[in-house]
Image (cartoon, rainbow, N blue to C red):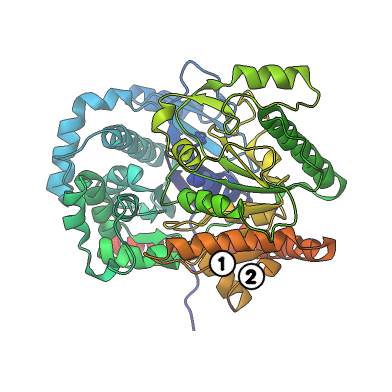
Amino acid sequence: MREKRLNPDFIFESSWEVCNKMGGIYTVLSTRAKTLQEQYPDKLVFIGPDVWKGKENPLFIEDTKLWPAWVKKAAEQGLNVRVGRWNIPGNPSVILVDFQPYFEKKNELYGAVWNDFQVDSLHAYGDYDEASMFSYAAALVVESFYRTKLSSKKKVVYQAHEWMTCLGALYIKKNVPEIATIFTTHATSIGRSIAGNNKPLYEYLWAYNGTQMAAELNMEAKHSVERQAAHHVDCFTTVSDVTGRECTELLDKTPDVILPNGFEADFVPAGAAFTKRRNEARAKILQVANALTGVDYPADTLIVATSGRYEYRNKGIDVFLEAAYRSLYDTELQRQVLMLIQVPAWVKSPRADLQERLRQGGTYSEPLPEPVITHDLHESWNDPVLNFLRSHGMKNDKDSRVKVIFVPCYLDGNDGIFQKPYYDLLIGDDLAAYPSYYEPWGYTPLEAVAFHVPCITTSLSGFGVWACTSIGRDSKLEDGVEVIARNDYNFQEVAEQLSATIARYSAFDKKATDKARTNASKLAKKALWGNFIQYYYDAYDVALRKSTERNK
């Protein structure tokens, strides 16, 4: 008979993306917060970097009445914090900390973490220092709050996300051993680097030595702190079985618990509101496409999108483009296809000529110069997407059955062209494609199916593996998700299958389309946080048992 699960009385979580929207981890934390807040009302505190100083942060609602005595005590201890609420469903408590003062003691901190845990920061560069100073500051916040406001009888958990928070997790383990520590890697730094440097990751995974590869790829500091955190925290976790195998081989540590990423239904409108938002999204996308390309798009245009971090190979952007090029010559296409690449690049500004056309309204019959991109870029000559389009002669000619538009900005509602947040455009897509090579979980496909958009992903994504497991066989587009088998060497086959799947979907009648959309939504419901949160409770239990044993 299983022992009764241990539950925390208080939870701290730190991440660089708390009140700082940058990528998938923001989605993990912000969509999960409501579920945890309901289970642990105001016993959950997120800690993030105070990087919005001097600017209004729409994600943070400051509340000076929250813990005033502790804030005063923290200031006396040299901690500069702001407290309040995260402006998301659940409105959890948040502490933002200024980490700048700790740079002056950087070498002292690196020396201590070497002596205590053999973390090698000697070759640190770039964002390692910034992340480490935040991580240390967050740990000081936890230590101060715990010593000031919580009794030693309380069961307290500290969960740190990604290598950027590892130094702080190790600090807590040494200096506040009463607190149970959890480290979650959403993607190992060295695994991402191997894949991003065009090295075959999967066939040779068993043979790679993570530490040796870190030296070869100049990733020693990040890998070292991540590896040591994985070995020393009370509970080491990751987001999928795919990444679990990676951790075993590259970090020499098998995760204690797998924490799959869920979603929150509150983000998806229902009924008439859903239809209204979808119609508005499609109208905006086709308006921008017309103003840019001078083509009048029919109402049944098949809108296919990809999005995410701008990792050209890892995220399968290269495959998406190759499939688009092949689709130009696909006689099986039944509709006009508009393919969107929504990945943030080095944006200079929204295109003034495109903005002017959008202001004037109406329908245009002549294209703008370079009618493939919505924003001006710095060093556009060096951009991989633009270089592919140019080298393949893809200029969105009027008679082309496939148009490709590059949207190289953060879709936060203030991009200057669409003026809609990402979800308010995603809902207008007909099909989404994420043919990733390296994808530990895959929030973008989960978000797509949550908004009833069937999607295409690969067997190398954690979400793709989960979808097949959930369905009980290889998942197909009719199920809401097409999972394409991908390995280190079958790029051409994946591109061909992606192109063929787009053509096949273009021929779906209304009944088949509605079925695929319904099945996509049904699959998404299986991934709601209400179903996945149990794995976090398991992680809390593992961590608390170890800390309880340690503190007897």
Asked if the residue under mark 1 is in contact with the one under mark 2, i.e. CB atoms within 8 Å, the reply is yes
Residue hosting label 2 = 476
181 up-or-down from 91: above or below: below
Separation of disc 2 and disc 1 at Cα?
Answer: 6 Å
The numbered mark, 2 or 1, whose residue comes first in the sequence reads: 2
Depth order, front residue of 487/130: 487
Which x, y percent locates residue 256?
37, 67
Which x, y percent locates residue 510?
83, 61
Depth order, front residue of 33/81: 33
User: Mark 2, residues whose alpha carbon is within 10 Å: few (<14), some, or many (≥20)?
Assistant: some
* Mark 2: secondary structure: loop
Residue located at (52% from left, 34% from top): 19
Which x, y percent locates residue 296?
77, 35
Residue type of the residue flagged with mark 1? Val
Which x, y percent locates residue 225?
24, 48
Depth order, front residue of 479/142: 479
349 up-or-down from 397: above or below: above
Q: Residue furthest bottom?
A: 1
Quadrant placement of the C terminus? bottom left
Depth order, front residue of 487/83: 487
The circle drawn on residue 483 is 1
Count the marks: how many? 2
Res 180 seen here: yes
Residue type of the residue flagged with mark 2? Lys
In the shown orientation, is residue 43 left or right of residue 138? Answer: right
